[in-house]
Image: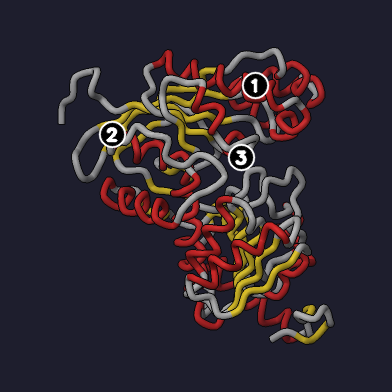
Amino acid sequence: MVNSASDAPTFAFVIHPVDPKKDVSRKFPLLGRFLPVPLINFFSTFFPPVYISEINGIQSDATGEELTGWFIACPYTPARMLSLPERVVYRKLVQTGRKAESLGAKLVGLGAFTSVVGDAGLTVSEQLNVPVTTGDSYTVALAVRAIVSAAEKMDISLASATVAVVGAAGSIGSICAEMLASQVNRLILIGRTEQKLHSVKEKCGAMGAATVKLSTDVADVDQAQLVITVTSAVNAPVQPQHLRPGAVICDVARPRDVSAKVAAERDDVLVIDGGMVDIPGNVNFNFDFGFPPGKAYACMAETMILALEHRYENFSIGKQLSVEKVQEIDALAEKHGFHLSGFRTFGAAVTDAQIEAIKQNAVQTLNRGWMARSAEGEFALAN
């Protein structure tokens, strides 16, 4: 399918360093190698948005149309975004968006922490001449697909399972809970304050949830066979002692919610990175962001999907998402050929053999008498 230059779909996606030294090294090896983290953070205040790469080769299964895009980096780390005044962060994000506009992007996607800082894209969108999306709707769709698929692999029955959602009061967590409400036996909604969780509980009840518990203690995930975690915490709140043997944890947050200690200490749980997507066509990102060729995060994919659909609009912005939008973007993804990819854990591929080993290790842990806290806070043997 041939388009004139003015009709051709384009997009840009905003990324940022999470691990200052490692991520800066991807683009600037010498700076990442020699500058200490405090200096990287200091200089980032004055550093302009960085052009990373041009993205080529994305092609719709439905229309055959090809898509061009760009990665643009906001130089702030999550910790830096939290430490600086909000207006300073907004100014840098707007500068990044304007750089995307200058390249010809008709839609800008906000990635990772740039999608949750402040008002989740509203202020940025008001100051740009092109629409903005955070990618959160497709992130929800893929997180739900991933946890359901992983449960099947781990022989966990959804109908009898307890599901914990960490960060349940947030835009992504609340919709994940709503979408799973009618499929599972029990929900545990975990957030910073119970007050913000009550409206989520009501919505889950309306969706058919049988039992819903509210909690402000992340340790309550030890009651759940399935966990989705999506907070805006800088320090990983989910630690090895919080997880029951045989559990599946879908970590949607960036920075990660699940501590790296879990990979080192718990060979009896399955941690999966949230929402890795197979991209249609022969895509070349011209940049290594840690995924295998042809694969991307769900938030990146949403921006691509909307551009292929020529839906240049503020799709997922602000703190309120909807089940309807999640279902809509999921259907558009299927139309254009975007699909849930294989599981990854802490950036590495997960094999069927590894999943079988996790199941066996979980049985052994339970046979040794693993102790779980009951809903009343008492400890009991888990089975």
- Tell me the distance, in whole angstroms, between the alpha carbons under discs 2 and 1: 37 Å
Mark 1 surroundings within 10 Å by alpha-carbon count, few (fewer than 14), some (14 through 19), many (20 or more): few
Q: Is residue 25 left or right of residue 133?
A: right
Q: Which residue is mark 1?
A: 29
Colouring convention used in this rendered image of the protein: secondary structure
Quarter of the N terminus within the rendering: top left
Q: Residue furthest right?
A: 378
Count of number-bearing discs? 3
Q: Position of residue 378 (x, y in %)?
A: 84, 82
Secondary structure, mark 3, is: loop
User: Which x, y percent locates residue 184?
Assistant: 52, 76
Q: Callout 1, which amino acid?
A: Pro
Q: Is residue 358 visible?
A: no
- Residue receiving disc 3: 116
Q: Which structural element holds mark 1?
A: helix
Q: Disc 2 marks which residue? A: 310
Mark in front: 1 vs 3: 3
- Residue 325 rendering spot, x and y as whole percentages: 40, 51
| Closer-to-camera residue (356/145) | 145
Q: Nearer the viewer, residue 265 or 108?
A: 108
